[in-house]
Image: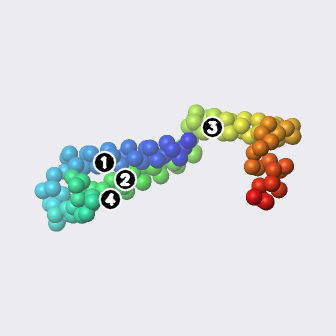
Amino acid sequence: MTLVQNVLLAAVVFCFFIGIGWLAVPDATATAWMGSAPVSFTGTWSVLPVSQSLVQVSLIMAAVSGLNFTAVSTSDATYRRTFVDPAFEEVEEALRVRHAYLATGRDDNPGAPDNPDNMAENSAS
């Protein structure tokens, strides 16, 4: 769950900086800041109304934000209690149920390919 949240946060931050940069920094201002005109994309990506430098800066900011979120989420006890611990409890419960099922020795699906009784039949075909 934390990985999904991290990727979503980075994507939102990336889109936010792309939007802010596209709206707030016109080409004339970018040219004045960089000393040359912003480089546009070529080929398939040429339809994008943003420059390569804006995308690069937005990617860096998104990566740093994702890294910061990872550091905070792994070290914050409240976050762990709220999001991570319930996920671990669900996985532990699923593993307990699977272990209990396997301990019974029952086979509710005798035709399953991973059934040991069918291994010889499956390898012969």
Which residue is denoted by mark 3 in the rendering? Answer: 87
The quadrant of the picture occupied by the C terminus is bottom right
- Contact check, label 3 and label 4, Cβ < 8 Å: no
- Dot 4: few (<14), some (14–19), or many (≥20) neighbours within 10 Å? few
Query: Where is residue 121 drawn, in percent x and y?
Result: 80, 54
Please tell me whether mark 4 sits on a helix, a strand or a loop: helix
Q: Is residue 77 visible?
A: no
Q: CA distance from mark 2 to mark 1?
A: 8 Å
Q: Which mark is residue 58?
A: none
- Disc on the earlier residue, 3 or 4: 4
Q: Which mark is residue 17?
A: 1
Which residue is denoted by mark 4 in the rendering? Answer: 56
- Contact check, label 2 and label 3, Cβ < 8 Å: no
Please tell me whether mark 3 sits on a helix, a strand or a loop: helix
- Disc on the earlier residue, 2 or 3: 2
Amino acid type indicated by mark 4: Gln
- Dot 2: few (<14), some (14–19), or many (≥20) neighbours within 10 Å? some
Q: CA distance from mark 1 to mark 3?
A: 31 Å
Q: CA distance from mark 4 to mark 1?
A: 10 Å
Query: Where is residue 45 drawn, in percent x and y?
Result: 27, 58
Q: Which mark is residue 61?
A: 2
Q: Residue shown at 58%/33% (left/top)? A: 82
Rendered position, 108 above or below 21: above
Q: Residue shown at 22%/55% (left/top)? A: 47
- Dot 1: few (<14), some (14–19), or many (≥20) neighbours within 10 Å? some
- Disc on the earlier residue, 4 or 1: 1
